[in-house]
Amino acid sequence: MAISPRMTILFDNYPGLPGLEALWGFAAVIQMPRLTVLFDTGSNGRVLLRNMAALGVDPASIDLLFLSHPHWDHIGGLDSVLELNPHMTVVAHEGFSKHLIRDLDSQCRELILVGKEPVKLAPGIFSTGMLDSEPPEHAMVIDSLKSVLAISGCAHPGMEAIVEHAKRFLNKRVDWAIGGFHLMYADSTQITRSIRSLQDLGVRFVVPTHCTGDEAVAAFRRAYGSRCVFGGVGREVVFDR
């Protein structure tokens, strides 16, 4: 029997389980049958490591670290994680600082540098390729046996653009949209347009958190009902639907 991917949010500005610390930023661990992925590292390494310890996530268990974009609230814990586990593979894109790219290349087992084309990172795991935004960003796409997931850091290109891109290169519907949706400065018209676009694209479940914004999170909950999963530090989601 296939094991569905499982995601635990390790770092978020939304509070979650008691005893965990919330700061601005985002990080999550995704556990696959044969691979453990850390998606982004939040804004503070000490807080990230304390939350990981409280949730029973060993930094040494991370096989692959995916960095969505170079903003401080997504790479702030990078040094802390690499210091404890220099044997992981790190995935970044060509929009990162050339100096950081040079340093990363000497601090991890392998550095995968993504350009504009989608890249297969492991069985069932892809980068969308670097999408146009400020800053440039790429998202992670997981094609499991039961569903397709699109996970963003901040979705600077727009979550609907990420989903549409993933749907096109996989030629499959994207079932889950997860992470920061970057709607915290959007007005109600923009929020409604984003929700309708994702629905039209076939997205069945959403996990809007981090920079999505309270108004947009509330709108997604109204639109998606029980198929909108709230984020927060410590939130665990099993993608079995």
Image (cartoon, rainbow, N blue to C red):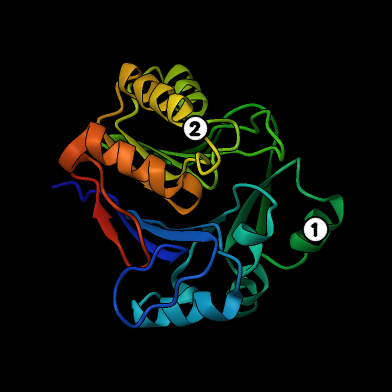
Left/right placement of residue 214 relative to residue 224 reads right
At horizontal 18% and vertical 38% (from top left) the residue drawn is 225
Left/right placement of residue 107 relative to residue 149 reads right
For the image, the number of numbered tags is 2
Dot 2 alpha-carbon crowd within 10 angstroms: few under 14, some 14 to 19, many 20 or more: few
Determine whether 163 is above or below 3 in the image: above
Dot 1 alpha-carbon crowd within 10 angstroms: few under 14, some 14 to 19, many 20 or more: few
Asked if disc 1 and disc 2 are in contact, CB closer than 8 Å, the reply is no
Viewer can see residue 146? no
Secondary structure state at the residue bearing disc 1: helix
Q: What residue type is labelled 1?
A: Leu
Q: Residue 100 carries which label?
A: 1
Q: Residue 63, how many percent across, how many down?
A: 49, 62
Q: Name the residue under label 2.
A: 187
> For residue 154, which quarter of the picture?
top right
At horizontal 46% and vertical 26% (from top left) the residue drawn is 160
Residue nearer the viewer, 64 or 53: 53
* Image quadrant where one finds the C terminus: top left
Q: Residue 219, how many percent across, how many down?
A: 32, 37
Q: Residue 77, how many percent across, how many down?
A: 61, 70
Viewer can see residue 226? yes
Residue farthest to the right? Answer: 99
Mark 1 or 2, closer to the camera: 2
Q: Residue 177, how many percent across, how many down?
A: 37, 37
> For residue 127, which quarter of the picture?
top right
